[in-house]
Image (tube, rainbow, N blue to C red):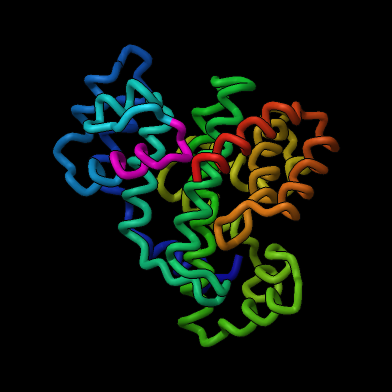
Amino acid sequence: MRSELMEQIEHVPMLPETVQKVEAVYSNPNSGVAEMADAIKNDPIITAYILKTANSPMYGLSRTVTDVAQAISLLGKDTVRTFTIASAANTCMDIDLSPYGMTQNNYLARAQLQNALVSRWVSKVDRSLLGHLSLASFLLELGKIVISRYLIESNQSALLHDALAKGDSTKKAEIAACGSKSEDVTATLFFRWNFDPDLVHLIRFANEPEDASDPATQEMAKFLKVAKEAITLEGTITDITLKNARELIEEYGMNQNFFDETVEKILSAA
């Protein structure tokens, strides 16, 4: 990775105390709803974000969530932990994705839709995978923010923007513009934030599951790869992206019915 890109990663602040408290509660198998809610309750920004996100129709709750404890009870510790970290990460980073031709709203919509799709789909398959997949699916695109800042500050935004405009894949355009793909940048950022090494590896192989040496990482990364294919950079699901996602599901031998049921519910709630 280029030294200038590493410098950008080093300039990203560490996550706040609330995240550290939530991580301590999350890693304690004896903790419950009350302990996690207590870790969050004194942070009004994160609390507001959790309630706003939990009440998005794409998560499929049948009633309005009015407090953090209720959000944890209805959505689970995995999901509320993800919302907590996503809120902190997005707050501490200046989101300017103009080199990708994306707005901040595009970025946030894609991240949330990716998380809702993966979380609801994986819940049908194996809930034990949510610990890593919920967080990875929501924050997978963080590397794009770092790459964008690097390209903007070095006056090289056109390298990425023009490559995407002519139809290059995001991965190809990123490597041509800065020497790294965004998943590697996100993984490096997660390593700096001291997240579980297995989560770091999962993110790193989200675009090439077959390259992961660990079979468990391979299987989890397939969910991320399918979700990336299913959702546009603008944060929408189209007939074309669904076709691409279903082709991957067939290639991977995954259950397409679970995926289709999840997509149908999310689209009907939009």
Q: Which residues are magenta?
A: 50-60
Query: In the image as oriented, which residue stretches furthest toward the front?
Result: 268
In the shown orientation, is residue 11 left or right of residue 110? left
Q: Is residue 85 above or below residue 237?
A: above
In the shown orientation, is residue 224 left or right of residue 113? right
In the shown orientation, is residue 77 left or right of residue 237? left
Residue 245 image-quadrant placement: top right
Q: Is residue 54 above or below residue 140?
A: above
Residue 35 image-quadrant placement: top left
Q: Which residue is nearer to you in this view: 193 or 230?
A: 230
Q: Which residue is nearer to you in this view: 217 or 106?
A: 106
Q: Which residue appears at 85% of the width and 37% of the height? A: 251
Q: Is 79 colored magenta in this rendering? A: no
Q: Position of residue 28 (x, y in %)?
A: 34, 19
Q: Position of residue 166 (x, y in %)?
A: 75, 78
Q: Which residue appears at 36% of the width and 43% of the height? A: 53
